[in-house]
Image (cartoon, helix red, strand yellow):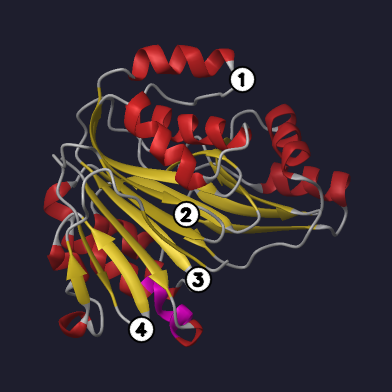
Amino acid sequence: MCGIVGLFIKNPEIEKNLGKYLSKMLIEMTERGPDSTGVAIYRDAVGSGSAKLTLLAPDSDYSWEALNLNLGVTFGDDYELNLQCDQAVLKVLTNAASAQTWVGERHPELRINATGEAIEIFKAKGTPARFVENFNLGSYHGSHALGHTRMATESAVTTEHSHPFSTGADLCLVHNGSLSNHNQLREELLREGITFQTDNDSEVAAGYLAWRMREGDSLETSLKNALSDLDGFYTFAVGTKDGFAVLVDPIGCKPAVMAETDDWAAMSSEFRAIATLPGANDAKIWEPVPSKIYSWSRV
């Protein structure tokens, strides 16, 4: 059992409150997932020709000085490194593939949580309240976000196994449920060039979507194909640079609720998370229909 939340800001004037709203939603999901917490925030997109990477240190005592020095030698003033606990957001004037290769070769001890233009992914072991405090999540701004509180069932309780998972540029997934064919599907995706950092079944779902979209499918088409290719019970929330989408498996086994006002659209495993949002009492509220794709986007 896990808790997932998603929030899409429709009114740009309240983008400054994204982190504050998301924090309250996550804390309401504590009972569904006290093992670890993670978020994907979309904000401050870099320009064309640049990349943004979220990096995870191997431990809390890691020194970022060597990375900073090496970045300066290679990129001069064309980079920015912002630390968040044992994680960091790197903005650099090169394409995402080159940036990933550079980090992998120069600093293989670092794990890459996410790459793209707008996405930032932070995750850690522990309760949502602890996560919110440590990362000062309430201060974050942005256009949309996904969050996850994990109760581990398929793999170890580590920061690396925490959601969200990202296997493509500006793409991420949070998942409540379990997949029965993830081992077979992982092998098939590895042959297609998709790489994985953990043995988590949810990362396989993220890899599947990244593969379908790499082959030219839209997000909606990729999710439609997932209905036949992914076996199991699930509620997925999938983030992209422009918005997010929600899909519940054909049986509708895992709980989910959705809501929308003129200012925002939201989803959660339980309504109590949505109830923390301003205007929730006047929102349109519904349960997602199994196999139906719901999405919000700025384009």
277 magenta-colored = no
Between label 4 and label 1, give the one nearer the viewer: 4
Relative to residue 270, is residue 190 depicted above or below? above
Asked whether, in this view, residue 110 is left or right of residue 149, the answer is right
Q: Is residue 31 visible?
A: yes
Question: In terms of sequence position, does the residue under pointer 4 or pointer 1 come before the other?
Answer: 1
How packed mark 3 is, by other alpha carbons closer than 10 Å (few <14, some 14-19, many 20 or more), is many
The residue that mark 1 highlights is 193
Question: In terms of sequence position, does the residue under pointer 1 or pointer 2 come before the other?
Answer: 2
16 magenta-colored = yes
In the rendered image, residue 160, in percent from the top left (x then y), is placed at 41, 34
Give how far apart the Cα atoms at labels 3 and 1 are: 32 Å
Question: In terms of sequence position, does the residue under pointer 2 or pointer 3 come before the other?
Answer: 2
Between label 2 and label 4, give the one nearer the viewer: 4
**Circles 1 and 2: CB distance less than 8 Å?**
no
Relative to the observer, which residue lies in front, 162 or 185?
A: 185
